[in-house]
Amino acid sequence: MAKASDHIVLVTGAGAGIGAATARRYASEGARVIAADYQADRLDETRKGFEDSMRGLALDLRNSDAVFAAVAELPEDFKDISILVNNAGVGPGLEPAHEAQLGDWEAIVDTNIKGVLYCTRAILPGMVERGRGHIVNISSTAATNNYKGGNVYGGSKAFVRQFSLNLRCDLLGTPIRVSSIEPGMTETRFTEVRFREDSSKTAAHYEGLTPLSGDDLADVIYYTTMVPAHVNINSLQVTPIGMAPAGYAIHRE
């Protein structure tokens, strides 16, 4: 298996949850890590204990100019990114489409779709030029399993999954790997935002089962990138044992 110490890793959405756990996992294994988040103050906790090997990067993924400038301005010892984890994502609200807030939809598209596109386009050419790299896109079980209120969020994660698979086609013949990791119920701040900071709804969402944690997903992401170079995990759906794909939704009078 590969060694993390051979890699420079950029993780988006690294201020909390899956992103923070992933950044710390790579750093703990000896990688140099760029932890990116739009709220720079959150990165202090992520970097704690790894200040020498982890660089914090305040980054608004919705701004293409900012993304390309940030990548271009990285210091020499952090420039040659070999693993990109496109983790940042939002999913506020669970209202049906005819009641949803347009601002929520725009936030989802700008972060979950455009953010992934901008980071990939800014970093992928360098990977191809160096003949080395792995892009890990964090999709969701919502990409393939539908539920009420998942309208644009599910659509955005279906895009991430399909974009990942199409990247594999574009990169065929190169050593660049691409993986779509698709988590199910995971206990992170994402859920609090989805329920608009309603702690009772957040608690009820997880009641009676043990959800995935940020550390669980960090382990999966790390493993995905450390398998031998000739192995590519195309897509991987990960759920807690208490969650399984459901059948059709049926309304009865």
Image (cartoon, rainbow, N blue to C red):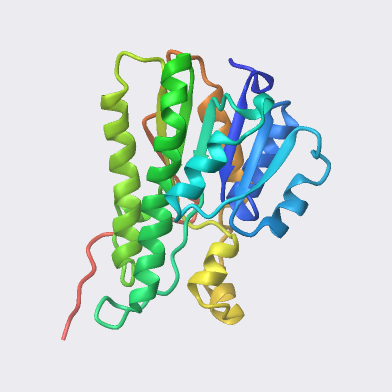
**Residue lying furthest bottom in this view?**
253
Give percent across and percent down for residue 200.
59, 81
**Screen quadrant of the C terminus:** bottom left
Residue at the (41%, 33%) spot, across then down? 179
Residue 213 visible in rendering: no
Percent coordinates x, y for residue 85 in the rendering: 52, 39
**Residue at horizontal 54 percent and vertical 56 percent from the top:** 186
Say whether residue 247 is left or right of residue 104: left
Which residue is situated farthest in the right direction here?
49
Residue 17 quadrant = bottom right
Residue depicted at 31% across the width and 71% down the height = 148
Q: How many marks?
A: 0
Q: Quadrant of residue 138?
A: top left
Which is nearer the eye, 190 or 253?
190
Q: Position of residue 15 (x, y in %)?
A: 65, 54
Percent across and percent down for residue 223 are 56, 29
Q: As drawn, which residue projects farthest toward the left?
A: 253
Q: Residue at x 81, y 46 (%)?
A: 48
Asked if residue 205 is positioned above or below residue 38 in the image, the reply reads: below
Image quarter (top left, top right, bottom left or bottom right) of the N terminus: top right
Determine whether, in the image, residue 114 is placed left or right of residue 201.
left
Q: Nearer the viewer, residue 163 or 76?
A: 76
Front position in the image: 225 or 105: 105
As drawn, 191 above or below 156: below
Q: Is residue 58 above or below residue 79?
A: below
Asked if residue 12 shows in the view, the reply is yes
Residue 71 is left or right of residue 25, and the answer is left
